[in-house]
Image (spheres, rainbow, N blue to C red):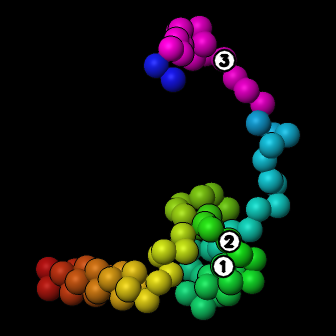
Amino acid sequence: VADVRITGQDREQWVDLRPYTNTAAVSVQETSSVERTYSLFRSLGLRFLPVVNKYNQVVGTITRSDLTPQALAETMLQKGKKHEHEHFE
């Protein structure tokens, strides 16, 4: 990799990735339940899952490790602290 030289002209080039993309990718809405998300992971054997908003724009990604009991507990604690902080301002 150290031998690769990229010029300014190289950086201006475009590559058509459409032949390599999956236009029917599975995703979840940002308001989807943990239960639904977990079911998708289990039934489809996914490693990661895009999270989309109501305009179908990707706003994040969920991985298998995000759905472990420890990760879910940590997320709930963080959300609780955030809500508590907003409540007392």
Kind of residue at badge 2? Leu
Mark 1–mark 3 Cα distance, whole angstroms, equals 36 Å
Q: Nearer the viewer, residue 70 or 9?
A: 70
Mark 2 or mark 3, which is nearer the start of the sequence?
Answer: 3
Q: Please determine whether, in this image, residue 70 is positioned above or below residue 53.
A: below
Q: Please determine whether, in this image, residue 16 is positioned above or below residue 36.
A: above
- Magenta span: 3-16
Q: Dot 1: few (<14), some (14–19), or many (≥20) neighbours within 10 Å?
A: some
Kind of residue at badge 1? Phe
User: At which x and y percent is residue 68?
Assistant: 47, 84
Label annotation for residue 13: 3
Mark 2 and 1 residues: CB-CB less than 8 Å, in contact?
Answer: yes
For residue 87: magenta?
no
Number of numbered discs: 3
Kind of residue at badge 3? Gln
In this view of the protein, can residue 55 be seen by the observer?
no
Mark 3 or mark 1, which is nearer the start of the sequence?
Answer: 3
Numbered disc in front, either 3 or 2: 2
Q: Residue at x 73, y 27 (%)?
A: 15
